[in-house]
Image (tube, coloured by chain):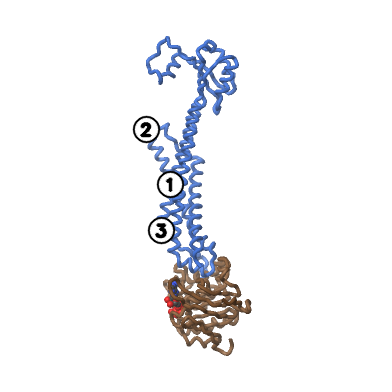
Chain colours: A brown, B blue
Amino acid sequence: MTLYKPDSFDTTSISFDRVALRYDGTQDVFSDVSFELTKGSFTFLTGNSGAGKTSLLKLIYLALRPSAGDIYLFGQRTHHLKRRQLSALRRRIGIIFQEFRLLDHLSAYENAALPLRIRGQKERDYRPDVEELLRWVGLGKRLHARPATLSGGEKQRIAIARALVNKPDLLIADEPTGNVDPEMSLRLMRLFAELNKRMGTSVLMATHDKALLGSVPGSVLTLHNGLIVKQNVAEES
Amino acid sequence: MAQAAEKRRESPLLPMSDTRESALFFVIAALCFLAVLTAFSVRATYSAAEGWTANVEGELTARLSGSDAARMEEALGLIRSVDRVQTAKALTRAEAEALLQPWFGTQSLPDSLPLPSLIAITTEPGTQNIGPDIKRALAEIGLEAEIDDHAKWAENIRDMLTLIRLIAMGIVALLASIAIAVIAFATHAALLARREIVDVLHITGAEDQFIAKLFERRFSLLGFQAGLLGALLALGFAISLAFFAGRMTDWVWLLPSIALDRWALMIMLVSALLAGLVARGAARLTVTLALGRMS
Ligand SMILES: Nc1ncnc2c1ncn2[C@@H]1O[C@H](COP(=O)(O)OP(=O)(O)OP(=O)(O)O)[C@@H](O)[C@H]1O
Ligand SMILES: [Mg+2]
């Protein structure tokens, strides 16, 4: 086994070294995946349904542990980290889940503010920011609605607001445009691109939608048969 | 609009109670009811026993041996001079017979039967173990006396109290462990029911302690409220029991009495606080263990 070290710890946000993943009692989803995403990069993750996109993202946001290999986040090897250190890493990541995972008993506003509440910030300090963010995603009139009373697209936009609210170093989006109309989808892509450019947020976005791949300069990771292929789509990388 | 939002209260991260929690509330209240009732009984027994021993502990009987009966007056004078003795008085033949009645029956004893010379002694309240002092004082002037200071009886009562206290402590310990088990079980169920919330909080970067606190706060409040209710019910029950027993029996003086004093209030408050603490500890343990199993 090679002792792999990311060349530049402070310039990588994610690095996989010969990572394998197998769910209990099944065959490998993938068995030998290595790649590296630099800080501030914009990356698409594609692959057929069931190829393992969501699984790969779960490894990154530390909801799963690899069955073999090493994962480095922000230059830190995650394998040996203590629970508190893992929590601290998670707080640097914003996640838009494929199935949203909003909390039903909280309002749209409270869902969006959740990461700040977890960080122990005071409600009166963050309220204006959260409300503005929700207005921006077009939910200004539904701030206090429960998720159950909202459409799929509206829920998705709350999920997006929640992922962005604490200005993460890394944004992970699992099919973030799956439930919104083309216009909203374009707006979201522009938002992600702007976050990426202005704030230096690294973005990793899983999508089926081939049309989106060219919309933002960046690279594409393709999962196929347990292997990963990385290619650049635009002139810049 | 902005002002409406101003007044809106933050929803708790853990949704408010459901039926599981009312079942738990009932169980904790019932356990606390039993615990407080146990504590009340022990306390009442203690004060009753205090009364019994206080009565006998103020009284002694000295018996002069046959040949020394003639020096009765001398003996009385000496005994009265002993420290902490209040009175000393020779018993008349009739009084002595009454004292011996349990052994010889109600028929008066034949005059020919020599009765022992008995002296009834009372001491200052709270005096203990004065018997040997009196015996020694009499021996110094050459009088031989048997002293019955009821020490044996008082000792028996003290042994009984110790036993009662041990039993009560056992009962309370048992009730507490039942409470711990039940709360751990209920927390586990709540955790399963709130799995999605816990998962999302965890993945969003909440530390174990943060999540555990949500459950701790919820269950310690529930434990305290249920405990307090149980304690109040126990007080009501004890008071009405004492009231009805008092109306129904002539032997009421034997029944331990219930007093709503500082001690009773303390017992109730401590039980409720203990219920809250136990609930909190059990919730913390359960949640921490469950979170430890998550990646
Ligand atoms: N919890 C799980 N337990 C067992 N197998 C799982 C689990 N989650 C996913 N899988 C399997 O792992 C494989 C990859 O699933 P994954 O959800 O990562 O695919 P995906 O690329 O995100 O698909 P989609 O585009 O449909 O979202 C699939 O074969 C799936 O059945
Ligand atoms: Mg998926």
Which one is in front in this view, the residue at disc 3 or the one at disc 2? Answer: 3
Q: Earlier in the sequence, mark 3 or mark 2?
A: 3
Check the residue under mark 1 and report the chain it is in: B
Query: How many angstroms separate mark 3 from mark 2 (CA)?
Result: 44 Å
Q: Say how many tags the image has.
A: 3
Q: Earlier in the sequence, mark 1 or mark 3?
A: 3
- SS for callout 2: loop
Q: Position of residue B163 (x, y in %)?
A: 47, 37
Q: Position of residue A34 (x, y in %)?
A: 54, 80
Looking at the rendered structure, whether the residues under marks 2 and 1 are on a common chain is answered as yes
Inspect the image, locate mark 1, and give the three-letter code of the amino acid beneath it.
Answer: Phe
Count neighbours of disc 1 (C-alpha within 10 A) and say few if under 14, some if 14 to 19, many if 20 or more.
many
Residue at image location 58% in from the left, 23% down from the top = B84
**Residue that badge 1 annotates:** B33
Check the residue under mark 2 and report the chain it is in: B
Check the residue under mark 3 and report the chain it is in: B
Q: Position of residue B100 (x, y in %)?
A: 43, 18
Residue at image location 46% in from the left, 49% down from the top = B176
